[in-house]
């Protein structure tokens, strides 16, 4: 059974006592004999920082460090549009996927409705997902977890003559270029320590730490020796178009317009196995044309920046634990990576699962390591 931990919620209008008081993870009781256990999280993207914050807040008696080669603004997470919805992963029970989504959505909704919303980069976002052909399942698994999900009316669909069906709903947009520095501060406040460093092998960490938590995204290909992990290239532009207030996403996932706090993200591409990190001007032109076909005023928007990121593709995200034999020592390793195009959406939910797995590791730890 997978464990999750309730979040302490506050009402939207109640003033916060501290900056983070709207959504702290409740400390776990009954494990204080584990004082001094050293936990390390590898990765400073949205998955790594979410996991590190959950562990540091829930297990205050542990020493928690986060190591990463790259920090904001240089991670994949930084450039993600950060809109919350998801496709189904084929081999993970839907109930578990629903819980990941719900835990993330509720956590970010708390922030979106708090006074922390602007500096955390988390906002509500309403709009439409439209389909050229009516999908087999008109209601995705998360339809009851977002706000006000419904099918679009014929009147709403009229402006999209190439599309036959659509869904209207309110979800969340989480802009990681603000959210990651905000989580970073929250981690430090919870007693966490941060170090910029490339980890060449998990063996390097085996003497200094009692539990290793691997959130290295695409880096897990090498770090965990996982050949299933592969890049899914995505190219986007940020444009100045403050008149656009609603998101529009083509159901094929390749064309989208997401208004944000400071700019509008337009995209995109999904190129499996493509490692190119430079902007392709032909693709940029195609993005502007495709988005312009959905929303003609896009062609008048000034381009602010262009960006390419490599999604950590995997058939299913890997959220599980193992005991690794590292330099003659048996070290518990919790993996949390491979979220593909849905890392922002699922980060908090999978972080809570990873926290549950870390707790299991602590319970099974020999007494001498707990002292
Ligand atoms: P990353 O952000 O890549 O972080 C990995 C971390 O691990 C980095 O800090 C890196 O330095 C570190 N690391 C790796 N290897 C090592 C090593 N050997 N030693 C030390 N550190 C290491 N998701 C959504 O939910 N909604 C969206 O709207 C959305 N839009 C997207 C649009 C685009 C164009 C792209 C490219 C992605 C989008 N995504 C979206 C997907 C999302 O960006 C990813 O799923 C998410 O960023 C993955 O987060 P991560 O923390 O696993 O990886």
Image (cartoon, grey):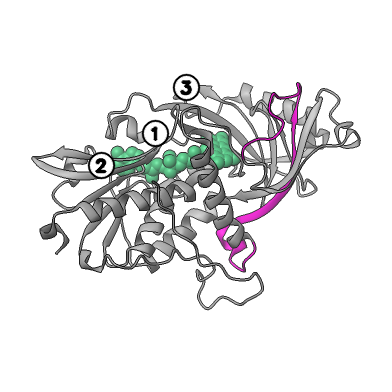
Pointers 3 and 1 in contact (C-beta within 8 Å): no
Neighbours of disc 2 within 10 Å: few (<14), some (14-19), many (20+)? some
Seen from the viewer's position, the closer of residues 245 and 172 is 172
Mark 2 C-beta closer than 8 Å to ligand 1: yes
Where does the image place residue 336, in percent across and percent down from the top left? Answer: 38, 42
Q: Is residue 150 visible?
A: yes
Mark 3 C-beta closer than 8 Å to ligand 1: no
Q: Is residue 27 left or right of residue 364?
A: right
* Badge 1 or badge 2: first in the primary sequence: 2
- Name the residue rendered at 10%, 40% in the picture: 327
Q: Is residue 78 visible?
A: no
| Number of the label disc, if any, that sits on residue 274 | 3
| Number of the label disc, if any, that sits on residue 218 | 1
Q: CA distance from mark 1 to mark 2?
A: 13 Å
Does the magenta run of residues contain 85?
no
- Name the residue rendered at 49%, 43% in the picture: 77
Neighbours of disc 3 within 10 Å: few (<14), some (14-19), many (20+)? few
Where does the image place residue 88, in percent across and percent down from the top left? Answer: 55, 32
In the rendered view, tell whether residue 340 sits above or below residue 228: below
Q: Is residue 323 left or right of residue 54?
A: left
The quarter of the picture showing ligand 1: top left
Q: Quadrant of the C terminus?
A: bottom left
Neighbours of disc 1 within 10 Å: few (<14), some (14-19), many (20+)? many
- Name the residue rendered at 57%, 62% in the picture: 119
* Badge 3 or badge 1: first in the primary sequence: 1
Disc 2: which residue: 199
């Amino acid at each position: 059974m997978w464990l999750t931990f309730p979040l302490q919620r506050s009402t939207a209008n109640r003033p916060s006592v501290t900056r983070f008081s709207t959504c702290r993870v409740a400390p776990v009781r009954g494990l204080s004999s584990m004082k001094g256990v050293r936990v390390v999280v590898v990765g400073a993207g949205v998955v790594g920082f979410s996991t590190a914050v959950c562990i540091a807040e829930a297990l205050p008696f542990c020493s928690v460090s986060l190591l990463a080669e790259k920090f904001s603004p240089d991670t994949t997470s930084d450039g993600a549009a950060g809109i919350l919805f998801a496709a189904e992963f084929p081999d993970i029970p839907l109930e578990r996927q629903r819980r990941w989504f719900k835990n993330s959505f509720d956590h970010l909704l708390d922030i979106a409705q708090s006074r922390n919303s602007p500096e955390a980069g988390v906002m509500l976002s309403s709009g439409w997902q439209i389909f050229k052909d009516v999908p087999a399942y008109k209601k995705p698994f998360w339809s009851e977890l977002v706000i006000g999900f419904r099918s679009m009316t014929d009147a709403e669909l009229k402006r999209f003559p190439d599309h036959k069906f659509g869904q209207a709903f309110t979800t969340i947009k989480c802009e990681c270029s603000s959210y990651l520095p905000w989580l970073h501060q929250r981690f430090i406040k919870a007693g966490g320590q941060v170090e910029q460093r490339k980890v060449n092998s998990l063996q390097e960490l085996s003497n200094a730490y009692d539990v290793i938590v691997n959130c290295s995204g695409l880096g897990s290909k090498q770090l965990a020796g996982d050949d299933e992990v592969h890049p899914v290239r995505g190219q986007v532009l940020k444009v100045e178009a403050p008149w656009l207030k609603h998101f529009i996403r083509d159901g094929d996932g390749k064309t989208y317009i997401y208004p944000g706090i400071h700019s509008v993200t337009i995209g995109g591409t999904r190129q499996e196995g493509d490692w190119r990190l430079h902007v392709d001007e032909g693709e940029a032109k195609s993005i502007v044309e495709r988005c312009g076909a959905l929303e003609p005023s896009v062609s008048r928007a000034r381009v602010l920046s262009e960006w390419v990121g490599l999604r950590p593709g995997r058939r299913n995200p890997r959220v599980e634990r193992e005991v690794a034999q590292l330099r003659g020592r048996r070290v518990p390793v919790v993996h949390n990576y491979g979220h593909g195009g849905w890392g922002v959406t699922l980060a908090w939910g999978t972080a809570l699962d990873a926290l549950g797995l870390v707790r299991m590791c602590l319970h099974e730890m020999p007494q001498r390591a707990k002292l």
